[in-house]
Amino acid sequence: MNVRNDRRLQRTSAGAVALAIVCATALSGCSIPIADLPLIGVPSNAPAREESPPAYMPVHDVPPPRDEAVPTVDEQKKMRDDLLTARDKQNAEASALAKSATK
């Protein structure tokens, strides 16, 4: 009975060690940029890095509001109809071209 428990403990310990190694490997991949690795490096045509990166990401730099007004319902309907007409025309041309190619 003791031998079974010892083997079970060894398997559990080996599994825990393997899991710890996999987790450590996965997390260590996030610690270094790939371009900084010695064998990979930065491509020769890559743009130069900034000497000092910005202190923070410009998350509050939003584009200015648009000058265009929102289309009215009638304008939206006209645009939808124009797009449907263009689609139908292209489908008709494509099917005519396919029919002429098969003859």
Image: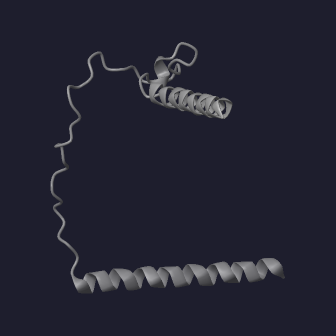
Q: Residue furthest front?
A: 1
Say if 20 sits above or below 102 in the image: above
Say if 28 sits above or below 75 in the image: above
Give the camera-side residue of 70 and 100.
70
| Residue 35 image position (x, y, % from top left) | 48, 21
| Residue 67 image position (x, y, % from top left) | 16, 61
| Residue 27 image position (x, y, % from top left) | 45, 29
Image check: 91 left or right of 56?
Answer: right
Q: Residue sitting at 39 percent across and 86 percent down?
A: 81
Q: Name the image quarter holding the N terminus.
A: top right
Q: Residue sitting at 61 percent across and 84 percent down?
A: 92
Q: Residue furthest top?
A: 38
**Quadrant position of residue 72:** bottom left
Give the camera-side residue of 71 and 51.
51
- Which of the colour schemes (rainbow, by chain, secondary structure, one colour) is used? one colour
Q: Residue furthest right?
A: 103
Give the camera-side residue of 32 and 99.
32
**Quadrant position of residue 17:** top right
